[in-house]
Image (tube, rainbow, N blue to C red):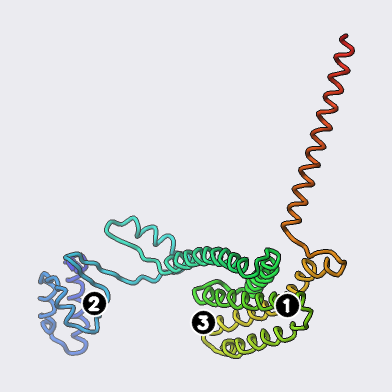
Amino acid sequence: MECIWSSSKKEELRKLLIANGQKFGFRDNSFEMFYNRLEQKPATVSIEEYKKVASFFIEEFVSEKNGFHTISTLVKVSKENRNAFVKTIKKQPNLVVIDRKETNETFLGTLKGNFELLINYSFIALFIILLLSFRRIELVIISIIPILISWVFTTGIMGVLGIQFNVINIIVCTLIFGVGVDYSIFMTTALQREHTYGKIELPTYRASIFLSVATTILGTGVLIFAKHPALYSIALITVIGIFSALLITFTIQPLVFYFIVSFNVKKGNPPFEFRRFFHSLFSFLYYGLGGFLLSLIGALFVKILLFLERQN
């Protein structure tokens, strides 16, 4: 107060009030109480006095716990001055900067990291469950390949459309991952039953998958007409993910099953087996490497014999 109202400013204000007050009929001592108020030393207003004024919302900015008091305030700065302002405030003692943007970015980054870890664990668990169910590594590969392709396809379309990952999108992507797993398992079961029993059951399973897609789209996809950004994002990603899973399941998965199982069977050969493939590859490398090493040893041995013969 004393820094603001110096003696020169007080005198200047008094002269201005007297000069302008005479024009409107005010006497020179009309504002004497105000002048006396300026001469008084102002008293500090306690926090209890501020709390009496409900419109100040003191509880929102001042808190106390176990004798420790904190005071918070809101500062809005432009994007150009944000970094400089944060660096300046952080250098001040007893001050803590809570940047909403930085907090959201940190939270989203942690959530994305946990989501990627969850996806990895889910794939491991899915691989083990499918292996215990089908008992053939080939059928597990046939079921997992469409899931991976549909996941890459969905995220690629999200990137093309400029859809960023957020909390809602990550939850929806988890739902899409689970639905894609169901479709892939249904299709693998249908293809396996057709190959084993020779009955045409693929149209029945396809109709079931298509009905599941229709109910999901009707239940969630209609939110695409919502004006709220979060609801629109949920619907858009759901539609993209479900149609991607449907397209990959109906097109890529039968082709993968054909090249792994049916292609060799039509030629009168047993289905492709990774165990037999790796066994053959190991045997080829074993005998090939062994023959190569024996050739080197034989050539070296012949040279040694020729060298000894020349010495004798």
Cβ–Cβ below 8 Å for labels 3 and 2?
A: no
Foreground tag (3 vs 1): 1
Residue 210: image x %, image y %?
A: 68, 86
Q: Nearer the viewer, mark 2 or mark 1?
A: 1
Say few, some or many: other residues with alpha carbon within 10 Å of mark 3 (under 14 / 14 to 19 / 20 or more): some
Q: Residue furthest front?
A: 197
Q: Which residue: 69% across, 80% down?
A: 246
Q: Is residue 301 left or right of residue 88?
A: right
Residue 287 in view: yes
Q: Earlier in the sequence, mark 3 or mark 2?
A: 2
Position of residue 39 relative to residue 231, above or below, is above
Asked whether, in this view, residue 186 is left or right of residue 74, the answer is: right
Labelled pair 3, 1 in contact (Cβ < 8 Å) = no
Depth order, front residue of 214/53: 214
Pick the quarter of the image with the N terminus.
Answer: bottom left
- Type of amino acid at the residue the image marks with label 2: Glu
| Whole-percent x, y for residue 49 in the image | 14, 78
* Image x and y of residue 176, in percent: 59, 77
Q: Which residue is mark 2?
A: 59
Q: Residue at x 35, y 60 (%)?
A: 89
| SS assignment at label 1 | helix
Residue hosting label 3: 230
- Please state which of residues 232 and 143 is positioned toward the viewer in this rendering: 143
Q: In the rendered image, which residue does mark 1 sit on?
A: 193
Residue 116 sits in quarter: bottom right
**Please, is residue 207 above or below residue 256 in the view?**
below
Q: Nearer the viewer, residue 65 or 217?
A: 217
Task: Name the kind of residue labelled 1 in the image.
Answer: Arg
